[in-house]
Image (cartoon, helix red, strand yellow):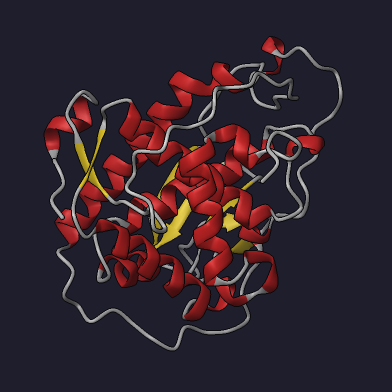
């Protein structure tokens, strides 16, 4: 799978090579029509239309795993290419939410801070969340500081599956940042699966916008990636993250139904 480099970093009109997951489909499904709902927006609150207080549920993405990784990267990853794909994935994800937030929600969209790659094995220099150093082998949205970050070991491992990996991980963690800005009634109790769904909505939304290009064989990368999270990554094995089938199903719901399909009460699925 190819991926554009410097050009897309300055102009999102250049198509980005990304991945395709159809779960048996051909990628031609249309997302449902946008439905506008009212939310409590905790960042940029002067632009909101509600007065209720948003309190995100305990976020599994900020919970440390007590199980150590049992696998490690092989060293075959081109780190320069990985860094560029990570940067592009950040821009692609932020761009979509920036342009489409008002299609679904009230209030003002504000992107989370991006800490990005960190070394979870270097505890002294790892970013902290609520006073605790982020561990290795995980990716996070941290409400304390409103930031997203991803461990280098995790990103390298997934990148060996395919270069779609950072797009999936970053869109998922960005989904947690979006959840933190929603009123409680719009937050699913299946917090991780909702983030998977939002990731699917964003990435396929960018495809519909002409900013992402899907190539043959990419659907296997996303299926393999979600299976990897469910089966190999300690934090992904917990019940609140769902099994591999549930994760693929949630991502596919975002693909076919868009953001409304990810919100409780907005779809029959």
Residue 186 image position (x, y, % from top left) = 74, 36
The quarter of the picture where residue 219 lies is bottom left
Residue 86 or residue 113, whichever sits in front:
86
Please state which of residues 80 and 238 is positioned toward the viewer in this rendering: 238
Q: Total of numbered circles in the picture?
A: 0
Residue farthest along the bottom direction in this orientation: 70
Q: Is residue 148 visible to us here? A: no
Image location of residue 132, percent across then percent down: 64, 63
Relative image position of residue 229 (x, y in whole percent): 48, 71
Reply above or below: 57 against 30: below
For image coordinates 45% across by 72% down, the residue present is 227
Closer to the camera, 222 or 249?
249
Give me the residue at 32% from left, 43% from top. 89
In this view, 156 is above or below 189: below
Q: Where is residue 257 shown, x and y percent of the image?
A: 54, 37
The answer to whether residue 206 shows anywhere in this view is yes
Residue at the extreme right: 52
- Quarter of the image for the N terminus: give it: bottom left
Q: Quadrant of residue 249?
A: bottom right
As drawn, 28 above or below 161: above
Q: What residue is rendered at 13% in x and 41% in y?
A: 5
3 relative to 136 in the view: left or right: left
């Amino acid at each position: 799978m190819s991926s554009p480099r410097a050009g897309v970093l300055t102009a999102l009109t250049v198509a980005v090579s990304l991945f395709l997951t159809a779960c048996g489909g051909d990628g031609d499904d249309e997302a449902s029509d946008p439905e506008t709902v009212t939310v409590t927006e905790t960042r940029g609150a002067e632009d909101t239309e509600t007065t209720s207080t948003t309190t995100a549920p305990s976020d599994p993405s900020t919970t440390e795993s007590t199980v150590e990784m049992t696998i490690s990267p092989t060293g075959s990853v081109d780190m320069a290419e990985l860094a560029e794909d990570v940067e592009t994935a950040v821009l692609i994800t932020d761009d979509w939410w920036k342009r489409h937030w008002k299609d679904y929600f009230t209030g003002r969209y504000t992107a989370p801070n991006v800490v990005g790659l960190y070394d979870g094995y270097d505890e002294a220099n790892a970013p902290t969340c609520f006073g605790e150093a982020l561990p290795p082998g995980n990716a996070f949205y941290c409400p304390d500081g409103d930031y997203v970050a991803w461990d280098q070991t995790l990103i390298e491992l997934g990148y060996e599956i395919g270069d779609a990996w950072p797009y999936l991980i970053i869109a998922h963690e960005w989904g947690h940042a979006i959840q933190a800005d929603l009123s409680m009634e719009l937050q699913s109790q299946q917090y991780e699966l909702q983030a998977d769904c939002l990731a699917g909505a964003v990435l396929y939304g960018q495809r519909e916008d002409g900013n992402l290009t899907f190539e043959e064989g990419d659907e296997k990368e996303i299926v393999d990636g979600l299976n990897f999270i469910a089966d190999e990554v300690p934090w992904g094995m917990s019940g609140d993250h769902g099994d591999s089938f549930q994760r693929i199903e949630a991502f596919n719901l975002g693909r076919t139904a868009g953001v409304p399909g990810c919100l409780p009460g907005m779809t029959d699925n």
